[in-house]
Structures are given as C-alpha cells and as structure tokens.
Image (tube, rainbow, N blue to C red):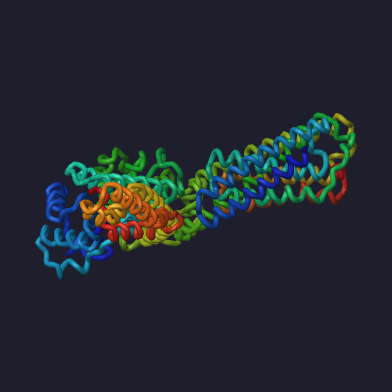
Amino acid sequence: MSALLFNSAFGFYVVGLFHSVAAFVSKKDLFHKIAFASVGIGFFLHSSFLVYRGVEIAHLPLTDLKEALAFFAWTVSLCFFISHMRYRIKPLGIFLLPLVTALMLGTIFFKSSPVPEILRSSWIYWHTICLFLAYGMFFMTFIASLLYLFQERELKGKKPKTFYYWLPSQVLLDDLFYKMLISGFCFMTLGLLAGVIWAEQDWVQGWQGDPKVIAALVTWAIYLILIYLRLTAGWRGKRAALISMAGFLSILFTFLGARYLGGLHTFQ
Amino acid sequence: MDLILVGLSHKTAPIEVRERIFFPEKHLPTALQRLQAESDLSEGMIVSTCNRVEVLVHGDRGHFQIVEAVKNFLYSYHALSRPFLENYLYSHLRQDAVNHLFRVTSSLDSMVVGEPQILAQVKRAYSLACQAGSVGRHLGDLIPRAFFVAKKVRTSTRIGAAAVSVSSVAIELARKILGDLENKSVLFMGAGKMSTLAAKHLSDAGIQNIYVANRTPERSEKMAAQFSGQAVPFEDRFSYVIRADIVLVSTGSDSFILTKSEVEGIIKKRKYRPLFIIDISVPRNVDPAVNELENVFVYDIDDLQSVIDANIRQRQQEAVIAEDIVVEEVSNYIKQASRHSVGPLASLLRSRIEEMCLEDLKERRHQLTDEEYQRMEKMLKKTAHKIAHPLITQLRESDDSPGHRLYKIEMFKKMFRLDEDS
C-alpha cells in the first residue's frame, strides 16, 4: 500500500513536470493548470504515504537516506505549493519539479533499513523535520533569486523576451526570496538546536567534531551573512543570488557529501 | 439565401478611402433602412470605425447578387464611383464571413492586435442594427456568438495584456521593477509639457508622492500644485533621488544632468533599493552608463519603443493561439447552424420530390378511376420515397467538413428549388 502511494505520487510529479515543460514551450495556460493539478495530487498522495508509512513502522519515515530523499522531495513540493498559492509564479514548476522528480527517482537506488536504536528519540523528529523544511525553503530562495536575475537581465537589456512575460514584478520575487530565506533560516536554527539538545541528552560523544555538523554550521553561517548583508546593505539581485547559490551548494554537500567523511551521521 | 460580409479595412484601403466611406453613428439607422430597402436584404448590420467599414448581411438571393447589391448600396450611399471603391472592397461568404466577423470582434484583425475598443464598437453597431429592426434570427444568432468568442479569446490568451503605448509601457515597467505603485514616489526633473503629461499617467496609475524639480521654480510650483505634489529646488534634486522610486527626466538641457558617478553615490544611500529612471528628453539627459549600476534601470525613449516592439511581438504570439480558438469556434458555429437547417430541409426535400412525382398524375386525374388513381398515387409516393431517401441520407452525412456541408445544403436548395420560408 505504501509503495503504491509512493509510486503514484512519483507518477503525478512526473506528469506535472512534463506539463510544466509543455507550458513553457507552448505558452498555453492549460498545461499550467494540468501541471499544478498533478503536483497537487502528487503532493496529497506523497503526504498520505508519509502518514501511512509512519503508522506502519510506528516511527517517522525519515531514518535512512532513501526516506530522507523522499522527505526532501516532499518539503520541496510543499514549498512549491505554498509559493504557487501565494505568488502565482508560473515558471516555478519548471525549476522545482526536476529536483522533486530527481529526489524521488534517487530513492530507487537505496534500500530501506531497520530503524537504528539511536534514532528512537523525539528530538530527532524535530531535528530532521526542521532541517529538511529549511532545505526546501533554501532551495526556493535559490530559485527565487535566479528568477530575479533572469528578469533583471531582460529589464537591463531592454529586450523583454521570456521571463518578462512570465514573471510577476521584481518586488514580488524579492519578497518570496526574503520570506523563504528568513523562514528557512528559522527552521534551520531550530533544527540545529534540536540536534544539539538530542546529542547532549543522549550523551553522544564528540558531536562537535562531526563533519556533517561542521558542514551544517558553515551553511548556517552563509545564510546568516546573507541575511545580515540584506538587512544592513540591502543586498539583492546578483549578489544575493550568488550567496544563496553558495548556500544551496553547501546544503547539498552537507546532505550528500558529508556522509562520506564519516562521523555520527553515517546511517545506512 | 446567404450570409455575406462586404467591407474594407486599414489592411486594404488607405485613410483617404476609409474616410469617404465612413458612416457617422447618427446616420446609421437611416443607412440600415436604405440598405434593407434598396438591396432587398432580410438582415443587415454596419460596423463603421476609423479603421474599417463592414456590412454584414443575410439575404434570400444568390450570393453574387447580394454582394453586388451591397456594393451598389455603398456606391450610391456615399456617391462614389465603382472604379474608385471596388478594388478596396473585400467580400466574404458564409463561413468565411463568420470567420472574419469572429476575428474582427476578437481584435485579431486590428491595427494594434488585441486592442479592446473594437469589441465595444461591434457591440454598438449591433445594438443600433437591432434598434433599426435590421437584425433577424440569422444575425441575431451569429453576432452575439462573436461577442462570446471575443470574450473567450480575451480570457484564455494574453492578447491584450502587454502594453503598446509609450506611457503604458513606462507604467508596465515601473510595476515590473517596483511592484504596486500606490505608495511609491516619483521625482520629475523638468516641468515641461512632457513631464506634465507623464505626471498625469503616473498619478492615474496610483502614484501619490510627486516631487518636481525645475530650473525655474515658478513652473515646478505650478506643476506640483496641479498634481498635489511638492516643488523642490533644482539644486537639491540629488537628495530627492534618494527618496524617489521613479525619476522622470525631461529637460531641455543639452548635456547629461545625471551621470554615473552621481548616481553611484546615491544608490548606496538608497541601500540598493530599485530605481527606475525614465529619460524622455532628446538629446538625452541621463548618461546611459547609469544603467550599468546595480538595481538602477535607465530607459530612454528608444528603449521604451523597443519594449513596445517586443510587446507587439508578444501579442502576435498570443494571436496565434487566439486564431486557433476562432477557427474552432467558427467550425462549432457552422456545425450547429447547419444541423439546425438540415431538419426542415429534409422534410421540404421529401415533399418536393413527392410533388414532382405526382405532378403529371394530378393533371390526368380526370382520365382515371378513383381506384386506379389511388393505386398510382401509392406507387408514385413509394418511388418518391426511394429517390428522396439516399438524398436525405447524403444531406445528413455528419463527417463532412462544415464548409462542405453548408455547400451541399445550398446545392440541394438550388437543384430542387427549395425555400425554407415558402
């Protein structure tokens, strides 16, 4: 049952991706509506999967890399959903859905494993949920800054082409960027705190030197700098886009790369 | 019986011709009455705008006679000679007329594709024709359909979305860069005619804070008062650039009054808030290099024009989608219209054939006994049925293209001299 839910969610995401591309190429609104509807159904099925699977294993389905990828995909499509409802930015799908699809596809290559005893703690729930929500939001931040750049280029070049006709105003894109940045940062802070509390409570030794912890702190610092520069010097546009790109690369490293350096976070 | 559209437009006729065939609105009711009476047409509507004059009619005669009748009406009404006008006129028959009407009403045939006025103009022409009593069941069915198609085109494409005039493009760009204009502020450098005109457009778009800086303070005060803005000394203009979101420059200066280094100092104080500079002066008053600065967008009059050009191309792209909608709607309409007309036509055809078969028998009635007559009548009716049956089947055939189907209906009507109204 859970596999059926998961696979059909995946199927709907793929349908959504194809229609986003079709909408981009043909400029027909109908494809947008189909794309959004399929992602909506996919998201609903994906959420049902998480609940169903959680009840099945009596644990949050977020304990191995397979489940982590699927959960990451879920947070990205959650962010897509919220942004779409709030801002109606049409080309979002074409940027977000490839990642969602790739993450869902990635789960095929990993086997699920039994839940390690160390992860049976309530703090781990908050730790992982908050961090993955933050990752999803930071990805949105990155995409928003990219779209801002694309439109800025057309505005500066005085030759409106694609994005000028597709995107809302720069101010709105900046608003999306800023809100996703701030909420992502809050969730990341909460997630890191939960991790620290959990480690202290369970007497985990040497968490301060763990490569993943260090990578996460670097990521956190990058976003802190971005927020600081935004508030004091009004950084936006190209500069902000570059930093948020660096931040997102750092997330990818934290999420995928740091596990090869050993440490406490190397689960199956 | 045919539906015909005869007319000319900016695509076929120059203004010198269009102005001579124009129907002023107050003359339309009498013109419609004359059209109906002189040309012996059952229904008619005249659309007359500065870009087109089109006469849509429905008549009971053959289409060639109808076209001639309408043309003759145009010549005589405007006292123009045939050679003068004939080459500019086009005529469309049946589904081509429907197609043309739908395209015109959807603003696909307009000079500026997607402009919204044409729909209102056709609506007005229709209501005048209704008042004049020249709309019957054919046009009364068709024309509201054209309004429906126009609305569909407008809602399902972005054909009218992109701005195509200098002032509306400037506002479109301002909204792109700054978002909602409600609580934004604009600084005018120069209080000339162009500035005043721009101020009117910008305040219509919702801008409330207006600053005016001009070398002669009297003029800036006069303009500021007009838009309940604030006149500021020309020397202080840079400190107001820090506050403003839009700077509109239109002075008679022959050198740059805003240079890159000046603006560079300002944007830091603005914390890189986006700044939209519109330079409508010729020669230019703002150094184009200012555009290289972060979050500063400088548009001169040529740049605005290039956005207009791009927007027109965008509208044309949308028009391609709109054309598909029109084609689909024309086919729907024709299908529906011909389905309506096959029913009565079939029974007319049947009785017409029967009539033809019994014609000679009826003439010889007196030579026959009642019994003989009834037998012959029964037999001939059977024959008539046998002839009519495949013809009606052919007529009802549904997989024809709508145009072909209509053609077939017309052909049957001619061959068997059928007239629905008789």
Q: Nearer the viewer, residue B277 or B171?
A: B171
Residue at 19% x, 67% y is: B86
Q: Residue furthest left?
A: B79
Which corner quadrant of the image does residue B124 belong to? top left
Q: Quadrant of the C terminus of chain A?
A: top right
Residue at 34% x, 51% y is: B381
Residue at 54% x, 38% y is: A86
Residue A32 place in picture, x, y as percent: 55, 48
Q: Quadrant of the N terminus of chain A?
A: top right
Residue A24 place in picture, x, y as percent: 55, 55
Residue B70 place in picture, x, y as percent: 18, 59
Q: Is residue B167 visible?
A: no
Residue A142 place in picture, x, y as percent: 63, 49
Q: How many marks?
A: 0
Q: Nearer the viewer, residue A129 or B216?
A: A129
Viewed as shown, does residue A266 lie left or right of B147? right
Q: Is residue A215 visible?
A: yes
Q: Nearer the viewer, residue B237 or B89?
A: B89
